[in-house]
Amino acid sequence: RPFSFEEEGYWEESMPEQEEDETGERVIWLRTTLSEIIELMGIKAHVEAQRREGRIFLEIKGDGSGLIIGKHGQTLDALQYIINKIAANRYKELKEKAILDTENYRGRRVEALKNMTLRMREKVKRLKKAVTIGPLNPQDRRVIHMALSEDEDVRTESKGDGFYKKLVIAPKGRGGRG
C-alpha cells in the first residue's frame, strides 16, 4: 500500500507558528524532522544537533552518507533547503538556519574548493586570462569569493541566473579593475 501523509497523521500535527524557545524545542524538532525524512529515504542513520554561531548544526551519522551527500553535495544541499523551508513555515520568526553535514563533507568541500581556487588563481596570473568555474551553488561561490577577496592580482564575479551560477576569476586591470 502506498505511503500517505494523511493516513500517517502528518497533517493532524498541524504546524502552528511558534515563539522563540530557550529550551531547544526547535533544535529537537529539526533533528526529529530530518530523521524522519532520512528514514523515508530508506537510509539508516541518526541525527545529532546543536546550536552554535547563530545556527543549528545537524550532523547525519550512519550508513549511506554517499547517498545523503549526492553528486557534489547536491542531495545534502537539497535536504538542507527542504529542512529550512519546513522550519520557516513552522517557525515564522526563525532567524537561525539549519546547516546539514555528514562525514565532515562540508569541511572537506571547503578545503577542496580553496585548493582549487589557489590553482585557478595561479593559472589566471600565468596566462593573464580569465578562468570560468562552475556551475556552483551559493555556498561554494562564497568560499571562492572569500578566498580571493584580499588578492590584489585577481577579481571574482558570479555569472548567470538561478541557484547554480558560474564563477569567473579574472586578472585585475590597471587601477584595481578587471
Image: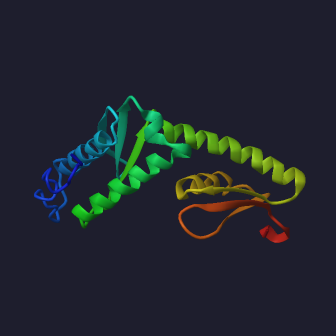
**Count of marks placed on residues:** 0
Residue at 24% x, 67% y is: 92
Q: Nearer the viewer, residue 72 or 122?
A: 72
| Residue at position x 20%, y 47% in the image | 24
Using the image as rendered, state which of residue 73 and residue 171 is in the foreground: 73
Find residue 148 and report its image quarter.
bottom right
User: Is residue 170 something that shows in the picture?
Assistant: yes
Indicate the quadrant where residue 86 lies: bottom left
Left or right: 32, with 44 as reference point: left
Is residue 91 shown to the viewer in this render?
no
Where residue 142 appears, x then y in whole percent?
57, 56
Please report the residue visible at 20 percent of the width from the left and 54 percent of the height from the top.
Answer: 5
Residue 42 % position (x, y): 33, 37
Q: Residue 105 in the image: x percent, y percent?
A: 50, 38
**Vertical placement of residue 141 versus 27, above or below:** below
From the viewer's perspective, tell me whether residue 49 is left or right of residue 29. right
In which quadrant of the rendered view does residue 60 lie?
top left
